Image: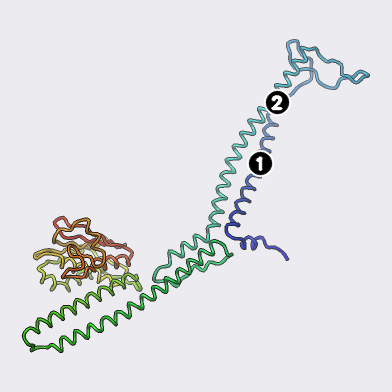
């Protein structure tokens, strides 16, 4: 049975593969560096030593090179003295200088070529390490890309990483398990919203019909006011349920998208709210110098515009103004009205939060700006607000 090194390597855990790869890399780099330094140091030393030799010849009186070579021996095998003490000292000194020169040359060459070899191998090891890290972290990059593609609209997708049972495989399996739980949670929420939309609206519609038919004119004194109060409460309950369902729908994200002309939608919403604006004695103006098209849900975007304009009308004063400005992919709705403290502006985007009257206001439910923020986030952007210079609020939504 033949062993396949590649298959054996793939079967190893991720940590073991990375450890073995780096160990092999540094082993090869060290061996190459050692061979490189030894060979080049020997070559450099040989070139420098060529000019340093001890030649045969007579030793001059002032010193110099000694006579070297084979000499006859006496019968006892002892070498006869070749030179005198002075010449012997000169020969030893010259040999010491030669040895020292060779050692210095070898040291300089070793340091020089070691530095060169170290730099070259450092660059090579860095390039190889970068390549190896890229190969080793390839599954992590694939998991990251798959994670970015997954959203609440395509929770059915999975990483489905294949390979040995190592740290990366367990991480991918854990993430897939989390996606299973999220998909079930979102699906349960969608079913709840769909069922609640029918179950909550139907009784209110029946109640309103009963009030209108059962308490039709003519009515005894006092019952007419009671009927109007009941119908008003019924309509408020319907608006509250509609707002809650809209908030739940926008929190789910976008199911289908299409190109929406936001400029035309803003003019249509302003026209629909003219009676309400006239009742509050508020002037509404839409300024859209250029067409703004947005990729999104047309129903949600229309609700975003309706909530912004209606809030600007409702929280205003008689003779006030509402300005809707569309320019450079930015929607701005500004109104006049009572001053808004800057530290209270973030609270206005929370559900059931109203300025001055928290949860006990006689008008509105405190869901308008919360719905606006939720719809904006569903479209990949956000809504910001700041107090107006002369009172009121300026709300801005910048579309990508």
Which residue occupies the extreme right position in the image?
Answer: 75
Query: In this figure, which residue is indicated by the disc labeled 1?
Result: 34
Callout 1: SS:
helix
Q: Residue at x 36, y 76 (%)?
A: 190
Residue 325 position, x and y percent, is: 20, 62
Would residue 263 be seen by someone viewing this image from the given angle? no
Instruction: Where is residue 102? Give x, y as percent.
Output: 69, 27
- Residue at disc 2, secondary structure: loop
Residue sitting at x 56%, y 44%: 123
Label 2, residues with CA under 10 Å away: few <14, some 14-19, many ≥20: few
Residue at far left of view: 221
Quarter location, residue 301 = bottom left
Please name the residue shown 68% across and 38% down the image.
Answer: 38
In front of the other: 120 or 6: 6
Question: Viewed as shown, does residue 382 lie left or right of 357?
Answer: right
Examine the rendering and report whether any part of residue 64 can be seen. Answer: yes
Check the image and report above or below for 196 versus 54. below
Q: Which mark is first along the chain, 1 or 2?
A: 1
Count the marks: how many? 2
When asked about the image quadrant of residue 200, the answer is bottom left
Q: Quadrant of the N terminus?
A: bottom right
For the residue pair 108 and 309, the one nearer the viewer reads as 309
Residue 290 position (above or below residue 249): above
Report crowding for label 1: few under 14, some 14 to 19, many 20 or more residues within 10 A (C-alpha). some
The picture places residue 21, in percent across and down from the top left corner, at: 61, 54
Specify whether 213 is left or right of 182.
left
Residue indicated by mark 2:
51
**In the image: residue 285, left or right of residue 144:** left
Residue 92: x %, y % from top left: 75, 18
In this rendered view, identify the residue nearer to me: 265 or 21: 21
Mark-to-mark CA distance, 2 and 1: 27 Å
């Amino acid at each position: 049975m033949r062993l396949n090194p590649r298959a054996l390597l793939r079967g190893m855990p991720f940590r073991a593969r990375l450890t073995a790869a780096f160990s092999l890399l540094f082993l090869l780099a060290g061996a190459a560096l050692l061979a490189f330094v030894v060979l080049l140091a020997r070559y450099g030393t040989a070139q420098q030593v060529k000019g340093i030799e001890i030649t045969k010849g007579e030793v001059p009186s002032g010193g110099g090179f000694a006579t070297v070579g084979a000499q006859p021996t006496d019968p006892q095998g002892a070498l006869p003295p070749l030179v005198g003490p002075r010449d012997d000292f000169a020969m030893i000194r010259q040999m010491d200088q030669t040895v020292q020169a060779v050692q210095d040359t070898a040291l300089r060459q070793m340091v020089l070529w070691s530095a060169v070899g170290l730099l070259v191998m450092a660059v090579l090891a860095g390039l190889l390490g970068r390549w190896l890290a890229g190969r080793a972290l390839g599954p992590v990059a694939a998991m990251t890309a798959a994670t970015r593609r997954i959203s609440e609209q395509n929770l059915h997708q999975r990483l489905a990483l294949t390979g040995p049972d190592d740290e990366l495989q367990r991480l991918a399996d854990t993430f897939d398990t989390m996606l299973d739980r999220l998909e079930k949670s979102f699906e349960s929420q969608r079913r709840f919203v769909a069922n609640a939309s029918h179950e909550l609206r139907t009784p209110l519609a029946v109640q309103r019909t009963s009030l209108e038919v059962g308490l039709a004119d003519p009515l005894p004194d006092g019952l007419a006011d009671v009927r109007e109060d009941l119908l008003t409460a019924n309509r408020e309950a319907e608006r509250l349920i509609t707002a809650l369902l809209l908030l739940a729908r926008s929190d789910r994200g976008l199911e289908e998208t299409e190109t929406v002309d936001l400029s035309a939608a803003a003019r249509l919403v302003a026209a629909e709210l003219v009676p309400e604006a006239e009742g509050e004695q508020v002037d509404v103006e839409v300024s859209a110098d250029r067409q703004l098209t947005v990729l999104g849900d047309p129903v949600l975007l229309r609700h975003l515009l309706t909530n912004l304009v209606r809030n600007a009308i409702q929280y205003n004063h008689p003779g006030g103004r509402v300005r809707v400005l569309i320019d450079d992919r930015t929607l701005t709705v500004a109104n006049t009205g009572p001053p808004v403290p800057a530290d209270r502006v973030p609270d206005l985007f929370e559900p059931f939060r109203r300025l001055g009257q928290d949860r006990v206001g006689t008008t509105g439910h405190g869901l308008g700006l919360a719905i606006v923020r939720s719809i904006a986030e569903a479209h990949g952007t956000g809504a910001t607000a700041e107090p107006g210079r002369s009172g009121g609020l300026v709300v801005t939504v910048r579309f990508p």
